[in-house]
Image (cartoon, grey):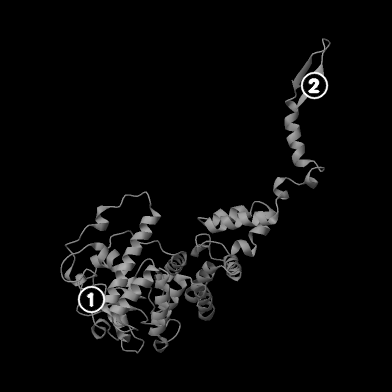
Amino acid sequence: MNMRVENSGGRVVKRRKLELAGDCRKRLRTSPEISGGCDFFDALPDDLVLSVLGKLSSTAACPADFINVLMTCKRLNGLGLHSLVLSKASHKMLAVKANNWFESAHRFLKLCADSGNVEACYTLGMIRFYCLQNRGSGASLMAKAAISSHASALYSLAVIQFNGSGGSKNDKDLRAGVALCARAAFLGHVDALRELGHCLQDGYGVKQNIAEGRRFLVQANARELAIVLAANPSAVVPRSWLTCNHQRQAGGAGGGVGGGGGGGCPLLSDFGCNVPAPEAHPANRFLSDWFTAQAEGVPGPGLRLCSHSGCGRPETRRHEFRRCSVCGAVNYCSRACQALDWKLRHKAECAPVERWADADDEGENDGNGDDAFDGNGNGNGDDEEAMEES
């Protein structure tokens, strides 16, 4: 603040009053004459605050990023639970941990789902269907997300149709599973592309077309590589990702896209693309953690988990999943999970045995079905040989 002062000589002197600046700013915040006693934040319109909170919920890297803001003040807490904000929440913001699952977390996901958030519909649907065993409600929520073209929801419903999950073996609908897979593959879902490729190669639920199936497997590997590169734009691509692997096992070569018994570029093989394992969806991580915390890590008496670490899906009845026909030690909910686990882990561990010698063999012929994959990660080439009805 400047003041004009005249001295005895008639000269005008400007004298700066710095000590008043702090008092002025303090009065600006608290004076009842300015903005009706409100600070600048209270003067912001709700529409602008909702826009900021919506941007935060869509870009939050974890739930804490959003929850910490809601705890700041009463106004942010109220506006943060607005349907416009919750409908934009990202899958990372909705990533609830299994050990933190309480009724409040359930209500929050339900509130997001009711706001039209497709990620919340899918996540809550998976939790209800597999963990809480509320099959009808879980399937309905996943269907709601699938109608909005949520690729993961479409693929999960396809897996349910392929296995007849939640029902009996007679509830399998292979054609419906292929149709759902095709829709998810059209939207770019990697697992759906891979599943559809194997279905076409084996003639499983669709007319056999080996060439078209191999084309889908190439697309799955190419998209898988593109996702890794997009997530690490500054990373140098290791030569091991793209170099040829001439030491491929003869069993795996027949199922690879490269064809023949010789080697080929790993990118052209469904089982040799050496990119890092894709990040699991929060819903799948929740399933894995939920059932790992169960007694002995099993979902129920006589039930098994999918052996692919990034899946987490459990059986809903005995002998629902297929197992490796070579070692009989692993089982999978889908061909996509089997192919992924083969190239990530099981290829180095699979060892043939004369006969599966576990307790499940006593119920092999109970009619529930325990189809078997061959050990090379692809099936044997024709439907009658690749699939064994238990």
Q: Residue 207: where, in percent of width, then height?
A: 31, 84
On screen, residue 29 above or below 298: above
The residue under label 2 is which amino acid type? Arg
Residue at left offset 82%, top offset 42%:
33
From this view, report whether residue 144 is shown above or below residue 310. Answer: below
Say which amino acid is labelled 1: Val
The residue beneath circle 2 is 4
> For the view shown, which residue lies furthest in the top direction?
9
Lateral position of residue 140 relative to residue 15, left or right:
left
Q: Residue at x 65, y 62 (%)?
A: 82
Residues at marks 1 and 2, CA–CA distance in whole angstroms: 97 Å
Give left or right: position of 293 versus 200. right
Label ID, residue 326: 1
Q: Nearer the viewer, residue 389 or 329?
A: 389
| Element at label 2 | strand
- Image location (x, y in percent) of residue 385: 23, 83
Left/right of residue 34 with respect to residue 197 in the rendered view = right
Can residue 192 be seen here? The reply is yes
Provide residue 118's location: percent of width, then percent of height: 53, 69
The secondary structure type at the circle numbered 1 is loop
Of labels 1 and 2, earlier in sequence is 2
